[in-house]
Image (tube, rainbow, N blue to C red):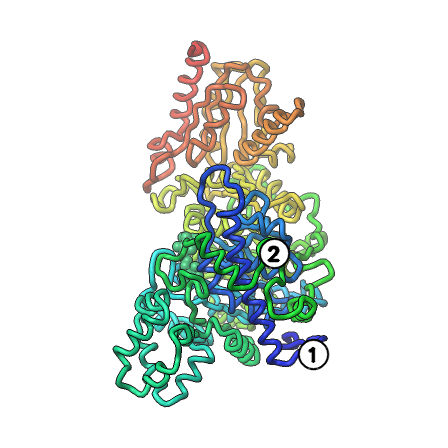
Amino acid sequence: MNAPLTTIPAAQVTPERRVHILKQLERKLLWLSAWMIHNANHIRPNRDGLKVGGHQASCASSISILAALYFEIARPQDRIAVKPHAGPVFHAINYLFGRQTREKMAGLRQFGGAQPYPSRTKDGPEVDFSTGSVGLGVAMTSFSALMADYVRLHDLGRDDILQGRHIAIAGDAELDEGNIYEALLEGWKHDIRNLWWIVDYNRQSLDSVVPDRLFGRIEGLFRDMGWNVVTIKYGRKLQAAFAREGGSALRRWIDDCPNSLYSALTFQGGTAWRQTLLADLGRSKARAIIDELTDDELGALMTNLGGHDIETMIETLRAAEADGDQPTCFIAYTIKGMGLPFAGHKDNHAGLMTKEQMEQFRADLGIRPGHEWDPFEGLDASEEELRAFLRDCPFGTPLTPEGRRLTAPLVPVPAALPVPRLAGRKISTQGGFGEILAEIGRGQGALKELAAHIMTTSPDVTVSTNLGPWVNRRGIFDRHTRNDVFRDGKLASAQRWGMSPTGQHIELGIAEQNLFLLLGAAGLTPSMTGARVLPIGTVYDPFVNRGLDALIYACYQDARFLLVSTPSGLTLAPEGGQHQSVNTPLIGMAADRLASFEPAHVDELAILLRHAFEHMQGPDGSAVWLRLSTRALEQKDRALDAAAVIAGAHWVVPPAPGARIALGYQGPVAPEAEAAFAELQAEEAGVGLLAITSPDRLHADWLDAQRKRRAGDRRARSHVEALLAPMAPASALVTILDGHPATHAWLGAVRGQRVCPLGPDRFGQSGDIPDLYREYGLDTDAILDACAEALLSVQEPRT
Ligand SMILES: Cc1ncc(C[n+]2csc(CCOP(=O)(O)OP(=O)(O)O)c2C)c(N)n1
Ligand SMILES: [Mg+2]
């Protein structure tokens, strides 16, 4: 059930007065957004001569849409993504609500100030979704709507929060991004509800004016995907003019007017409008409508588009509200830069008003010098009345006493996960992952709660990444119960794919950006819904690249999820170069808020998987990435130091004090390293063998220790420094992984050791493992050659 659609304001305000006040608030938003940017560029001292920038025109375009939404329509339980370049308007809205400070506003685009584009992590709890990389914030709302349903249908959420709507204010150019259409398709499959996308249709992007007729196409696409499409083209003044004699000719003229001409006339103003209109309509009955207006009035009439008419906006949104929960796309016609001197100019995206223009604008709005930041300065309503209005509008009420950012109780993680029998077995990390998860999926005893909170997802690689047994146990999520036809027909299949609202796996089509957007949305459920969901997504490792921006976007927002990428590297030899990932370990190292690991053996994997469930929930945690393989390795019967595995490396055979060389391996190349180690041991005393489980954690910890030492903590020492300490200062390390060798090259900087890093640095090709390991220098011979060379340089240190 949705919440009541309207709340009756405590202070009774007539509809006319409401509109009057809303128009005052619009003026204020236009002023504050322009002023914040102006202040950042022209008033604040500039220390480095860099252009600060900002998007006054993009802000102006969206004022009425955002005002209608935040001051009238939105309810606290709604979750809203604001188009990146309207960030200052969003900050100004919060400022008027008393949820943003003047200092942050004045610090727009400054260190510690309000962010140019709304940021969950930096701007704080008022931001529901970060935006910035165009298209992603819009699509994200589709997945957050799905997750809201998931949480509700699994009864994981809070009872005291009403079901909300997920809303994106999109720039029209955002609809050029392919990820929008991937999300539309996926949304249709999942029968997404309670979703609104309001397009600020100013027909301009960064460089240009958008081609005409494009929207006809886009509108059709939305309808095909089951959306309701509502076009908000004309404001009240134009509608009234159209209703007069000659009005239909005027309407036809505007409908046929190319976007570029409309923009140019808007920029030129009333005189140009008159000239052009008279040339075309001078002999028609529309002439009477034109003649009775001054130039300014004519300009105002011709630019009276629906997206700038707050009454039309409110009416349309209200009507859609009453229409139910079907996803709805609103195409709100606007003018980029509306109300500012560069309105409609095609180059206005990054345009800034001059000091003189700003001065004029200030005077026009009745704002006294020195009162630029006063929230209610220059408005035709008392401060008291405006404050009461803001307090009483639906969004004026906080979502919960603790605000918009919620917390969820922790899900206990058992001291150890159920690990399959390993000793003497040959099994891959991917196989081990599938078995452990399937075991958790039984939900027995201490695992019951953990199992209930896990949600898995995969872009059409569920079975091939070994999620099948888990899915068989926990079912596929769907808002509607759908039977498994194969099963019902008693047709043999290892997969039982019944779908129901209680299923715990969300099956996606092959679109990796959707995977990461869903992981992002699922990873934010604790703060969005107060429900703890532990999302696990599987994907082929090379195709992490396909969704990379969405992955970074999810991490930027501090979403908490587990990414399992498998298979990886040359090791899936016959699949060929397009399937063999090389760069992903480096991505894992360079991605912030993503702890990345690559275990070689399943006992390590079990430790890391358990750690992931905790790390995803910890206040200082993050998302986690496990890079796995299908290469089956002989498993060991051993006791491991779990802390070392989590810290990123452990000695399989520790080096003797003063050792001249050690071998380090990461992931499924362990057997080659072990074989080389066995030969090396016969010739070189004290050699060590290091299992590297996370170059990412090792490196991050090493940087951290250096920072701490520089800050005065002389005793700070990182795990990798401690590990390498027994070796001779001029010793060598030969390292190997099935990924780019730069992943390990930095290890030489830890203690000044010589490092010979091995790993593929070229596209792969198909073959079998012996051929490919030889070709790319990962076989035992290559390792021994590298050891021989490294030892030479250790004997004769270069000067
Ligand atoms: C993925 C991505 N590519 C490029 C950009 C640079 N960029 C910022 S805004 C913009 C055009 C935005 O146009 P539109 O969405 O129509 O916004 P508006 O006209 O309302 O400013 C571009 C290309 C970006 N932010 N993200
Ligand atoms: Mg635009």
Q: Quadrant of ligand 1?
A: bottom left
Say few, some or many: other residues with alpha carbon within 10 Å of mark 2 (under 14 / 14 to 19 / 20 or more). few
Asked whether 769 or 694 is in front, the reply is 694
Label 2 amino acid? His
Asked whether 516 or 659 is in front, the reply is 516
Residue 243: quarter of image: bottom left
Quadrant that contains the C terminus: top left
Q: Residue at x 33, y 59 (%)?
A: 208
Vertical arrangement, residue 660 with respect to residue 132, above or below: above
Judging by the rendered image, the residue that carries numbered circle 2 is 371
Q: Residue at x 69, y 78 (%)?
A: 12
Nearer-N-terminus badge (1/2): 1
Quadrant that contains the N terminus: bottom right
Question: Which dot, 1 or 2, sits closer to the camera?
Answer: 2
Give how far across and how far down residue 18 sits, in percent. Answer: 61, 76
Residue 98: quarter of image: bottom right
Asked whether 330 or 393 is in front, the reply is 393
Label of residue 492 in the image: none
Residue 314: quarter of image: bottom right
Q: Is residue 255 visible?
A: yes
Q: Is residue 179 visible?
A: no
Judging by the rendered image, the residue that carries numbered circle 1 is 12
